Amino acid sequence: MSATDPKPLVSTIVRDDEGLLVSAAKGGDATAFEELVNRYERKIFRLGMNITQNREDAEDVMQDAFLKAFRNLDNFQGDSRFYTWLVRIAVNEALMKLRKRRPNQVSLDEPVKEGEDPVFREIEDWGPSPEQRFAQTELNQILNQVIGELEPIFRVVFLLRDVEGLSTEESAQILGISVAAVKSRLLRARLRLRMKLNKYFRRSEPQ
Amino acid sequence: MNCKKVILELSSYLDGALDSSIRLDLEQHLGRCEDCRLVVDTTRQTIQIFCNAEPVPLPEDVRTRLHQALLARFRQKTKTI
């Protein structure tokens, strides 16, 4: 740790050794668990916000995920990364929130209807960079809007793979679906988001 | 390679996960098909824009409540041991 680091570690365990932190937490070392929380709280809150699109729900998701992880730490076998295990808990919590809102519309198990996405309906050049054309706040609003419009079955896969940077295999493990299903849903998610963004970012007549 | 096949392989292409022979076929198609080129380019930008998005901040009051809840759980556990 550098001398200028404003947030010293709570635990004395070196930063890179997550396995040791998990072992210590399992053995009852609360400071080790707190260090794991410090490490991932921002990511878990962001994931909760992106899935639920609601700050209160995201807070519940984050709090319940860490409390459940603490309670069930003995069940964590270490055959995946601690973060992957934590994300799995958080995703389940977030999906439960969505199911409460729309009981019959949120299932990750439902088969994705086959059929072509209307990819070639919206083919326009976006110009050099939409990020330069929009102010940060406006861009954030657009991204929140379009990700919120995406069906949860696609939204979650996109968030895990493209925003959280998890592998296809880790995403499949977290969601309890096959690698092939992750790939198929990721493709559709990306294409649908592209189409939704097109109306904002196309070079001609942006809305 | 035709346009439909390009779309099917699009994700793997953008992830750099295509075999070199298929990638070469796909890139040859892109060289002569402007529609596919635009779809590939705007899909790539879609991913990048989300990746580069400003991180959602964790509000301090939300963080405080999380750590208070954890502290309460730690104390509860210590009492039961």
Image: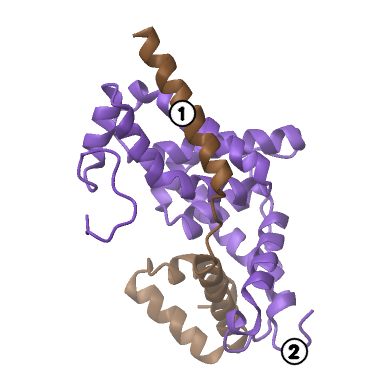
**Labels 2 and 1 in the same subunit:** no
Q: Secondary structure at mark 1?
A: helix
Is residue A122 something one can see in this rendering? no
Badge 1: chain ID: B
Q: Give x and y (percent) for residue A196.
A: 71, 68
Q: Within the image, what quadrant is residue A201 found in?
A: bottom right
Q: Is residue B65 above or below residue B71?
A: below
Q: Amino acid at mark 2?
A: Ser
Q: In the image, which disc is placed on residue A204? A: 2
C-alpha gap between disc 2 and disc 1: 52 Å
| Front residue of A45 and B81 | B81
Q: In the image, which disc is placed on residue A39? A: none
Q: Give x and y (percent) for residue A157.
A: 54, 51
Q: Residues within 10 Å of mark 1 (few under 14, many from 20)?
A: many
Q: Within the image, what quadrant is residue A33 found in?
A: top left
Q: Residue furthest bottom?
A: B32
- Please give the residue where the numbered disc 1 appears in the rendered image: B70
Q: Give x and y (percent) for residue A141.
A: 69, 65
Q: Secondary structure at mark 2?
A: loop
Q: Is residue A192 above or below residue B79?
A: below
Q: Amino acid at mark 1?
A: Leu
- Which chain corresponds to the colour purple? A
Q: Quadrant of the C terminus of chain B?
A: top left
Residue placed at 57% from the left, 42% from the top?
B62
**Residues at marks 2 and 1 touching, judged by CB atoms closer than 8 Å:** no
Is residue A66 something one can see in this rendering? yes
Chain B pictured colour:
brown
| Front residue of A195 and A18 | A18
| Front residue of A42 and A201 | A42
